Image (spheres, rainbow, N blue to C red):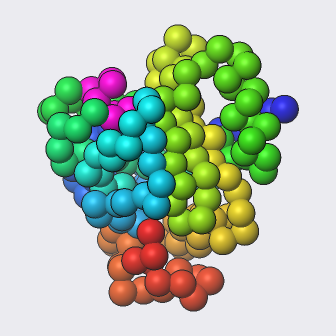
Amino acid sequence: MIYPIFQFAYFVNDVEAAAVKWHKLYGAGPFALSPHHRCDKFQFRGSDVQADVSYAFGYLGDVQIQFIQQHDDAPSIYRDMYQPGEEGFHHAGCLVNDFAAARTRLLDMGFVNACELWADDVNAAYFDTRAVNGGFTEIHGDPLHILSTFAGWKRAHENMRPGDSPIMDRAQPFPDGRDPDYL
């Protein structure tokens, strides 16, 4: 089983400021914002503690870039690596079409499943792979509605023009017609 990396994620102090900086430096974006994201089901190291986090998602070429901002001091996979005020690389994300098999494979390799969640009708899990890559590895299911959303974000990146905002207009629906507030 090979899981190509589709996403690099960074823990930041402000998702919008990070989006603007990456847009200026690399031409990344536009970024879709998901403020104060809540999961339907959530487990962090065996407990139901869910931190207050906001996300920004955008593309840089073929790679999805995610920014994560934690608004509280709750225990989390983010606070496992960074104290308040610190920023940096957090995880590499892999899309998987057999979530159970990918989960079992990483457990069998001896990696700790630090966080598992269900949101937007898809499973995701974060394995502590810091000994290998300096961060976590996320496995993320790949149902069609998620792939469609990611394709819309990538298309928005491909269609960016000089002067466009690095933040996606939340009033503008995704190319598949869904409202960006569904996140």
Judge from the rendering whether residue 146 lies leftward or rightward of residue 104; answer left or right: left
Q: Position of residue 153 (x, y in %)?
A: 54, 67
Q: Name which quarter of the figure residue 137 lies in.
A: top right
Q: Residue at x 39, y 36 (%)?
A: 47
Judge from the rendering whether residue 74 lies leftward or rightward of residue 119; answer left or right: left
Residue 77 is covered by the magenta coloring? yes
Q: Position of residue 93 (x, y in %)?
A: 58, 40
Q: Residue furthest front?
A: 47
Q: Where the C terminus falls, by quadrant?
A: bottom left
User: Front-most of 98 and 61?
Assistant: 98
Judge from the rendering whether residue 17 lies leftward or rightward of residue 137; answer left or right: left
Q: Residue at x 59, y 82 (%)?
A: 175
Q: Name which quarter of the figure residue 149 lies in.
A: bottom right
Q: Is residue 110 above or below residue 161?
A: above
Judge from the rendering whether residue 38 lies leftward or rightward of residue 36; answer left or right: right
Q: Residue furthest top?
A: 131
Secondary structure mostly taken by the magenta-highlighted segment of the chain: loop
Residue 98 is covered by the magenta coloring? no
Whether residue 21 is visible, yes or no, is no
User: Front-most of 83 and 63?
Assistant: 83
Whether residue 94 is visible, yes or no, is yes
Q: Residue at x 47, y 24 (%)?
A: 135
Residue numbers of the magenta segment: 76-82
Q: Position of residue 152 (x, y in %)?
A: 59, 72
Q: Residue furthest right?
A: 1
Q: Is residue 161 above or below residue 124?
A: below
